[in-house]
Image (cartoon, helix red, strand yellow):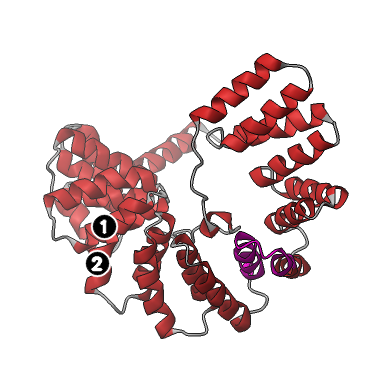
Amino acid sequence: MNPWKRSLAVLALSLPVWAATQAGPSEAAALEQQGKWAEAAQIWRAIAQQNPKDAGALASLGVDLSRSSKFSEAAAAYRRALALKPNLPGIELNLGLAEFKQGRFQQAIPAFRAALADDPENVQARTLLGLSCYGAHRFTDAARYLRPLAKSDPTNAELHQVLAQSCLRAKEYDCALEEYRQLVQQDPNSAATHILIGEALDGLRRTQEAIAEFEEAAKASPREPDVHFGLGYLHWELHQYGDAKAEFEKELSLNPTHAQALAYLGDIAMRENRPGQALEFLRRAVENKKDLRIAYIDMGAILADQKKYDEAIAVLKRAEQLDATQPDAHYRLGRVYQATGNPAAAQREFARVRELHEKKDEGLVQKMSAGPPALHP
């Protein structure tokens, strides 16, 4: 390319920037009215570059970047604007939205909380704050913010679903049960809702009622993921091992790698004095899911009985790593150390057992494979 043409090309590329630097807020507003968000953002960016302390320009830049779905850049612009002028109206809410749209729920929470503090009657801020808490797995906070909204909007099924899930995960089982009862009235054949009612009832230790709900779920949708595992677990809780085994086997017929079903089948086999079969189930379970504590505890017990002490110590230490606050792994390790002639190590484990108190069982909701439904901003 000859020097003259090269100069023209450079000039052509620089024209949009030059034009933006010559334009002002009125030109940006005119572009916004035409829906030309990217062009308007270019003008606001140029204005902010000329005057880095212009909080209004930065806020407007954030708005147009958000409209162009450039949420990360928008959030940065909003933060710069707020650093210059903390009380800029509406910008905390906009910042929260930009973070929320990226799925950055934890980062959105402070912005929405500030927006709600500025305007306690702002339904949008409260809703987005509750949803952000849910997305960040802060379920107690989510339930607190969403409960009054759901009460004032009884027909909003999606909102009631999120509130119910929040209550369930926060172990506020009465709240969860109330919400799910309303939802099942709208759709009596919803297997998923019957499952969730069952989980709430299990949390309230109303196990027989929970079984009835899971049976309704299995009737409505026999191939629903986890329904037979959940039913089996409830029978297992009541020491009804024959019924539990039948349900776990049904779950495995649908999903041969269902780790929880394998682990509890292994536990039942161990209780029925079938250690070889138990180990087979338990090893398959941890191959598919590495954090199944019950599988490691049971393997440790079987291996210790078989005097395979090194293997027993390894799996029991893994159980300890998964939850050091439960005394059973410490107790079993202490017994193994005693058997291998290591009294000092045994005493350390037994001392730990004395320090601990049995934690309440997590309940079915923590055992089910699926976590809470994800938000999709």
- Say which of 178 and 306 sits in front: 306
Q: Residue at x 23, y 57 (%)?
A: 125
Task: Measuring from the top left, give residue 102's x and y in whole percent.
Answer: 41, 50
Task: Measuring from the top left, give residue 364's x and y in whole percent.
Answer: 54, 59
Q: Is residue 284 left or right of residue 29?
A: right
The magenta span reads 225-245
Q: Which residue is mark 1?
A: 145
- Say which of 66 and 167 sits in front: 167
Asked which quadrant contains residue 214, the reply is bottom right
Q: Kindly tell me whether residue 204 is visible in this rendering.
A: yes
Label placed on residue 297: none
- Say which of 96 and 61 sits in front: 96
Residue 145, compared with residue 227, is above or below; it is: above
- Say which of 159 and 100 sits in front: 159
Prevailing secondary structure class for the magenta stretch in the rendered image: helix
Q: Is residue 324 left or right of residue 249?
A: left
Q: Residue at x 35, y 48 (%)?
A: 99
Q: Residue at x 55, y 26 (%)?
A: 352
Kind of element beneath mark 2:
helix
Q: Which residue is mark 2?
A: 149
Q: Residues within 10 Å of mark 1 (few under 14, many from 20)?
A: many
- Residue 227 is inside the magenta segment: yes
Q: Kindly tell me whether residue 38 is visible in this rendering.
A: no
Q: Residues within 10 Å of mark 2 (few under 14, many from 20)?
A: some
Work out how far the residue at label 1 is from the one at label 2, CA to CA, in angstroms. Answer: 8 Å
Asked which quadrant contains residue 73, the reply is top left
Kind of element beneath mark 1:
helix
Task: Measuring from the top left, give residue 114's x and y in whole percent.
Answer: 19, 46
Q: Residue at x 35, y 43 (%)?
A: 107
Residue 315, compared with residue 148, is above or below; it is: above
Residue kind at label 1, given as amino acid type? Tyr
